[in-house]
Image (cartoon, rainbow, N blue to C red):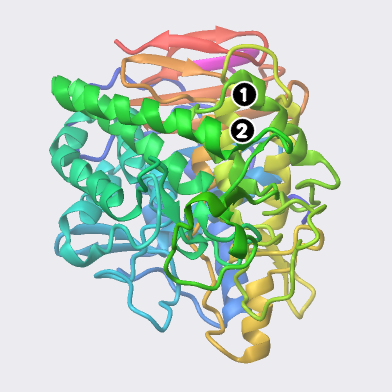
């Protein structure tokens, strides 16, 4: 990883007045309390230089607005003693902004840059990464960006909302948990119910489980192949709980009860049918004749011929995204850093190394049979954070979370022909070498070269805020922090001008008290005023007033 660059010396300012809650869709009060945006402008200059060297041009996004003014208006500011994390934070916003499209109907977030040869939706948008798009966008100051994108998927007829499986209803509710606008969920509730019913109609079998083709989970060429997968079944559980919660908030008791019952039934099926007690892992239940080989485009249930695939894949952690597993199944997390499991220098492999079909030969540049994927890394970081926020003892702890996140940061680079190593995000990569697999194969084939440039198929800001820094969004006005940064790892960090429920939060960790001059330890400011603090890294709570 590159060496850090020197930063300007900061002079620290004081407190903002208490902010009033803002109307939905309006920019929040974005003024920072302790950080100076100008101190981070050099990152954009750096990324511009890197982009010109890597691609031969500079693309600021479809609207053409320069990145730095947009950042100044929209993003929370982040400062950390680990400059690799700090630089990557700003790089991911730099890349994300390229995919923001302002249409006559509002904002839409895209995935590809440049657009691939095929057409997706109305604006080149795909739904598979929508939970990541909304997860990142919920921390921007203009709440209309995320809210417009959420509405797009449930209001534009050719948006193709079910082209891929994704926890769409859950993503909508997660958005409202951050911005406090429960009315968005209420408005979309009829469409969310229709969306869920469509999945039941086309993908749910008589046994109650949902089947999917791995490609339609955005996970083609997997070892397990098609069947009853931990992906779609977990998403449907999460969506059922989300719809129930949205309905309950809208006093729609009948809908809340019905969808909670759906979730309860599906949870039991996931536990009894997708948990492999021999492997101690959630696995795909596949057609016996085709297990491990995806050929057909249509799934045919052969009834009694279904069997557990017998291979651990990273998607087996997806149930933790929605708090599905019992405590006894936490043993599955031991595989994450097992040398024969998912362990990789640059992140987790998508399939366990001990499988005889690990990284089987394929001419397809996009394979989920072992390469690492930023998509999967994001899901696993979020799932691990959810697990580590549960009460009780843990198979893995904050040190493990930080190790996985650090590897994710390390992976998001590429070395150019000049020898320069630059910040980069693309498609799949080798977990041992960090080489971008799809990128290199497309260059060799001279086909769709540059397709994966700044690929918006993953998240970074959201797992950093909700995991490492530890802000756990809630429907009520209680702020709950549970940092997963291990003690002694960083001497300081700050996330400043962070919009939350119509207020502005600042979260500081200052080991010596000399970085931000707000005292030693962990401090939470609400609208510039100190709300809570503690001397050590750990859980912290305060109420919005």
Query: Is residue 240 a member of the stretch shown in magenta?
Result: no
- The disc placed on residue 388 is 1
Q: Nearer the viewer, residue 284 or 323?
A: 284
User: Label 2 belongs to which residue?
Assistant: 384
| Image position, residue 4 (x, y; %) | 74, 50
Spatial CA distance of label 1 from label 2 is: 6 Å
Residue 511 falls in image quadrant: top right
Residue 324: image location, x then y, percent = 50, 28
Q: Position of residue 197 (x, y in %)?
A: 23, 46
Are the two marked residues, 1 and 2, in contact with CB atoms closer than 8 angstroms?
yes
Q: What secondary structure is found at the residue carrying circle 2?
A: helix
What residue is at 19 percent from the left and 36 percent from the top? 184
The spot of residue 59 in percent (x, y) is 44, 74
- Disc 2 crowd rating (10 Å Cα; few below 14, some 14-19, many 20+) is many
Front-most of 516 and 486? 486
Question: Is 238 situated above or below 307?
Answer: above
Which residues are drawn in magenta? 517-524
Q: Is residue 78 above or below residue 507?
A: below
Work out whether residue 297 can be spotted: yes
Residue at the right extreme?
A: 339
Name the residue furthest bottom: 446
Height in image: 28 above or below 413? above
Quadrant of the rendering where the C terminus is positioned: top left
């Amino acid at each position: 990883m590159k060496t850090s660059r020197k930063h300007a010396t900061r002079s620290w300012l004081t407190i903002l007045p208490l902010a009033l809650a803002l109307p939905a869709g309006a920019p929040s009060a974005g003024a920072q309390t302790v950080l100076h945006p100008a101190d981070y402008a050099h990152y954009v200059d750096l990324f511009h230089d890197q982009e010109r060297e890597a691609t031969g041009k500079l693309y600021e996004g479809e609207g053409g607005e320069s990145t730095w003014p947009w950042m100044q208006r929209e993003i929370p500011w982040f400062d950390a003693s680990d400059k690799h994390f700090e630089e990557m934070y700003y790089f991911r916003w730099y890349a994300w902004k390229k995919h923001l499209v302002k249409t006559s109907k509002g904002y839409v977030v895209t995935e590809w840059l440049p657009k691939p040869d095929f057409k997706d939706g109305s604006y080149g948008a795909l739904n598979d990464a929508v939970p990541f798009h909304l997860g990142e966008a919920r921390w921007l100051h203009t709440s209309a960006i995320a809210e417009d994108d959420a509405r797009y998927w449930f209001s534009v007829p050719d948006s193709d909302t079910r082209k891929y499986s994704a926890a769409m209803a859950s993503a909508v509710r997660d958005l409202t948990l951050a911005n406090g606008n429960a009315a968005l969920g209420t408005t979309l509730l009829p469409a969310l119910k229709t969306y869920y019913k469509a999945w039941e109609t086309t993908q749910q079998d008589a046994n109650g489980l949902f089947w999917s083709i791995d490609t339609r989970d955005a996970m083609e060429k997997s070892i397990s192949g098609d069947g009853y997968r931990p992906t779609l079944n977990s998403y449907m559980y999460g969506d059922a709980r989300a719809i129930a919660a949205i309905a309950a908030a809208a006093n729609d008791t009948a809908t809340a009860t019905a969808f909670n019952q759906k979730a309860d039934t599906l949870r039991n099926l996931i536990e009894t049918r997708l948990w492999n007690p021999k492997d101690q892992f959630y696995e795909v239940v596949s057609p016996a004749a085709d297990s491990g080989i995806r050929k057909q485009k249509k799934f045919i249930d052969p009834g009694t011929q279904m069997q557990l695939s017998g291979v651990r894949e990273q998607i087996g952690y997806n149930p933790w995204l929605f708090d599905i597993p019992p405590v006894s199944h936490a043993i599955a997390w031991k595989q994450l850093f097992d040398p024969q499991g998912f362990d990789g220098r640059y992140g987790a492999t998508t399939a366990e190394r001990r499988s005889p079909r690990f990284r089987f030969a394929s001419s397809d540049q996009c394979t989920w049979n072992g390469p690492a994927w930023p998509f999967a890394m994001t899901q696993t970081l979020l799932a691990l954070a959810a697990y580590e926020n549960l009460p009780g003892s843990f198979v893995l702890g904050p040190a493990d979370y930080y190790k996985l996140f650090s590897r994710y940061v390390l992976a998001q680079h590429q070395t150019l022909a000049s020898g320069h190593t630059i910040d980069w995000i693309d498609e799949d990569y080798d977990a041992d070498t960090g080489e971008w697999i799809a990128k290199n194969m497309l260059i060799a084939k001279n086909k769709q070269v540059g397709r994966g440039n700044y690929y918006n198929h993953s998240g970074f800001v959201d797992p950093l805020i909700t995991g490492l820094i530890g802000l756990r969004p809630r429907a009520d006005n209680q702020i709950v922090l549970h940092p997963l940064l291990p003690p002694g790892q960083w001497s300081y960090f700050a996330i400043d001008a962070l919009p939350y429920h119509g207020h502005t939060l600042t979260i500081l960790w200052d080991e010596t008290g000399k970085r931000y001059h707000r005292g030693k330890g962990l401090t939470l400011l609400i609208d510039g005023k100190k709300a809570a603090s503690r001397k050590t890294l750990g859980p912290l709570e305060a109420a919005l007033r």
